[in-house]
Image (cartoon, rainbow, N blue to C red):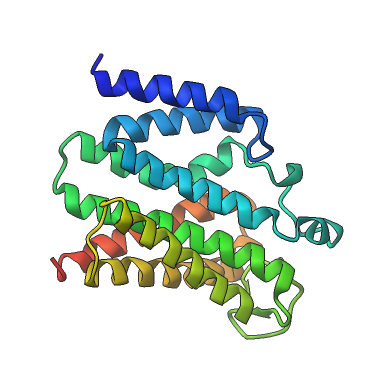
Amino acid sequence: MNSIWITAFVVNGFLVSYAQRFPLLTKEGWVHAGVLGTLLWGCLGWNGWFAVVIYLALGSFVTKLGFAKKQLAGIAEGRGGRRGPENIWGSAGTGAILALLIKAGFWSRSFLMIGFAASFSAKLADTFGSEVGKRWGRKTFLITNFRSVPPGTDGAVSLEGTLASALGSCLMTFTMVLLGLVPPGPVAYMVFFVGLVSTLLESLFGALLQHRISWLTNELVNSIQTTFSAFTAILLSLYLI
């Protein structure tokens, strides 16, 4: 076994065994996070792994903001805000596939890495927008017709939530640039923009289809959103690099 995979397994095994005391993931969620972390470190190195650790930390932090009031309103994340395996792979499945393609030497590492960055920028933007909008959105509208709806409704948007989405995409893009995963300048601005726009498209998707199709779960919508974001960013990067 290559030394990088041994390091990845040992580091992630140790961290997961220690981190289980924190109420961020379910017990099964931590196991799957360890698998994901090992895969990312083995494929991308420590910086690709660390970017997703930051994503998890920021996403968990914003989920806990105002959690008690969201819980009283019946719109908080279930299981006390703990994410399970389905949440892990719904959010990071696209990034994991791109990491495997990079490790396999499929096509261009730089273009695939841009897609990797965009998928997580989109997902953090979605998490920030959803959690802040549910708690602090003063006026919540359905994105299709701007009819006023209760916070937490599929396809609902608010000014506060949209601004929070922009912040989430910005933070994740900045992290990717800081860790040397994507170049600064036009590419970074594009990753930020794609992450934000894909969040609005995810709301549109939820408003039009999610309540009509029983098998269209939040996790599947997350996968569609991150895949769209990655694919769009890769296409746009062809004109920027």
Question: For the view shown, which residue lies furthest in the top direction?
Answer: 1
Q: Is 205 placed left or right of 174 in the picture?
A: right
Task: Give the percent coordinates (x, y) of residue 158.
Answer: 63, 78
Q: Could you say which is closer to the camera, residue 61 or residue 129? A: 61
Where does residue 42 sit, x and y in percent of width and height? 30, 29
Q: Is residue 17 left or right of residue 103?
A: right
- Asked where in the image residue 74 lies, by quadrant, the reply is bottom right
98 lies above or below 228:
above
Residue that appears at 69% across and 53% down: 64
Q: Looking at the image, can residue 159 be seen?
A: yes
Would residue 40 appear left or right of 124 to someone viewing this image?
Answer: left
- Give how far across and how far down residue 30 sits, in percent: 57, 30
Residue 194 drawn at (x, y percent) = 37, 69
Q: Residue at x 22, y 35 (%)?
A: 103
Please indicate, yes or no, whether residue 158 appears anywhere in the rendered image: no
- Residue 35's place in the image compared with 116, above or below, is above
Does residue 6 sit above or below 68 in this rendering? Answer: above
Up-down: is 178 above or below 35? below
User: Could you say which quadrant of the image residue 84 lies in?
Assistant: top right
Q: Quadrant of the C terminus?
A: bottom left
**Front-lying residue, 190 or 184:** 184
Seen from this angle, which residue lies furthest bottom?
Answer: 146
The residue depicted at 73 percent of the width and 80 percent of the height is: 138
Viewer-closest of 46 and 191: 46
User: On the picture, is 48 further left or further right than 80?
Assistant: left
Q: How many tags in the picture?
A: 0
Residue in the image at 61% along x and 73% along y: 161
